[in-house]
Amino acid sequence: MGVEICVEGLTKSFGHQVIWQDVSLTLPAGEVSVMLGPSGTGKSVFLKTLVGLLKPERGSIKIAGQDITKLRERDLYEVRKLFGVLFQDGALFGSMSLYDNIAFPLREHTRKPESEVRRIVLEKMDMVGLIGAEDKLPGEISGGMRKRAGLARALVLDPEIILFDEPDSGLDPVRVAYLNQLIVDLNAQIDATFLIVTHDIASARLVPDNIGLLFRRELVMFGPREDLLTSDEPVVRQFLNGRMQGPIGMAEEKDAAQVEQELADLGNGAGQNAGEESTTAMTPRLLPSPGVTRPPRWQAIAEREVETRRKAEPHGEGEPPDQAEPPQKTEPQGEAESPRKKGEEVADA
Ligand SMILES: Nc1ncnc2c1ncn2[C@@H]1O[C@H](COP(=O)(O)OP(=O)(O)OP(=O)(O)O)[C@@H](O)[C@H]1O
């Protein structure tokens, strides 16, 4: 089971530049949260602060009850072992095979014999669909495969928390769909706490339990996916609909009078491109693949999703689409099976 991260009153600056201030949120144990925000609002800085690579000026970050902002470097080293981090480009060593890249944290941080290293590396490569690509160099594979190799490496120390920095950047929409499914399946299987920074609104609508939005040096909102997707808060609506009208400008925020005019125009149906819809509609959540053993919390999620889809139907009835399968029987943790079959071909995604 993942651990809860409780952030309170967190402030980070570089010199006189305040990146964000007074950020408070709780990442619930075992849940998937997404952090959104315009470029430069400090999402990557937030990830680095959580893992203790950057020191905040004020506030606390409690992980398993321990405030990591107060820890000395030696103790932080121990806490970092709870984390797996997937960097944007996978951050693989170019001269090492995928196998050696993925084995690296095990060889660095543990004294496991090579036979055990091999078992773990192959298990994680299987989980991300990379069996057969052990000898490839990072330069010989696609961006999507590099991301999956980075993910396998983030998994080898069995982290309680996984941080993803723009896992979908540079991938085509089909590969993003596969990656989203992989993230949801992994979360169901290992039940760690996930935090994903992304610019991909479609993924943010589909994948998480919770969504947060950083803007103007503040955390505008953080809460259950349903709350953000149906929110009337102008910044949230502008961002989730990816439109120009609203408080978020090209480089910085706009002045209040301009925002008011734009929102009034939007309300009148003016100022919106033809065919463009602005929506606070709930979108169904991506559920784990059939056959993936789900921990108990997925029962409640699946029940909520069936209800959401029922409400979304024009007359409140009718067959829900494929994804809204009835809640599956959940199994106790620790018996999760890989969604991929052994020997399945490595997809170039
Ligand atoms: N080590 C650092 N020293 C000084 N300034 C920094 C440092 N790291 C980040 N910054 C600044 O902090 C701000 C936020 O950067 P960050 O990369 O976290 O933004 P972001 O929201 O992740 O952006 P994007 O969505 O474009 O990736 C930027 O202005 C950046 O220049």
Image (tube, helix red, strand yellow):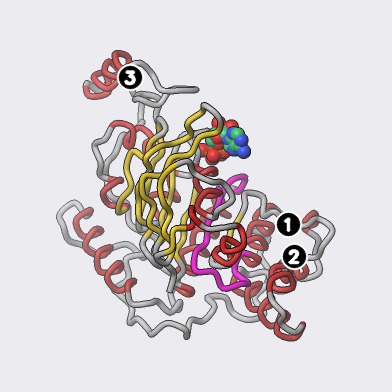
Q: Name the amino acid, label 1.
A: Leu
Q: Which residue is mark 1?
A: 92
Secondary structure under tag 3 reads loop
Q: CA distance from mark 3 to mark 2?
A: 50 Å
Give the CA separation, mark 1 to mark 3.
Answer: 45 Å
- The residue at the point 73 percent across, 69 percent down is 108
How far apart are the two marked residues, 1 and 2, measured between alpha carbons?
6 Å
Residue 217 appearing in the image: yes
> What's under tag 2, amino acid-wise?
Asn
- Is 113 magenta? The answer is no
The numbered disc on residue 271 is: 3
Cβ of mark 1 under 8 Å from ligand 1: the answer is no
Image position, residue 154 (x, y; %): 61, 64
Q: Could you tell which of marks 1 and 3 lies nearer the N-terminus?
A: 1
Rendered view: 9 above or below 133: above
Residue 178 x, y percent position in the rendering: 54, 60
Segment colored magenta: 154-171
Please name the residue shown 82% across and 62% down the image.
96
Q: Is residue 64 left or right of residue 261?
A: right
Q: Position of residue 115 (x, y in %)?
A: 75, 86
N-term-proximal mark, 1 vs 2? 1
| Residue at screen point 67% across, 50% down | 89
* Residue 273 position (above or below residue 300): above
- The reply to whether dot 3 and dot 2 touch (C-beta < 8 Å) is no
Position of the N terminus by quadrant = bottom left
Q: Which residue is mark 2?
A: 101
Task: Locate residue 231: give its quadrant.
Answer: top left
Ligand 1 rendered quadrant: top right
Q: Is residue 164 magenta?
A: yes
Badge 3: residue crowd in 10 Å (few <14, some 14–19, many ≥20): some
Q: Amino acid at mark 3?
A: Gly
Are the residues at dot 1 and dot 2 in contact (C-beta closer than 8 Å)?
A: yes
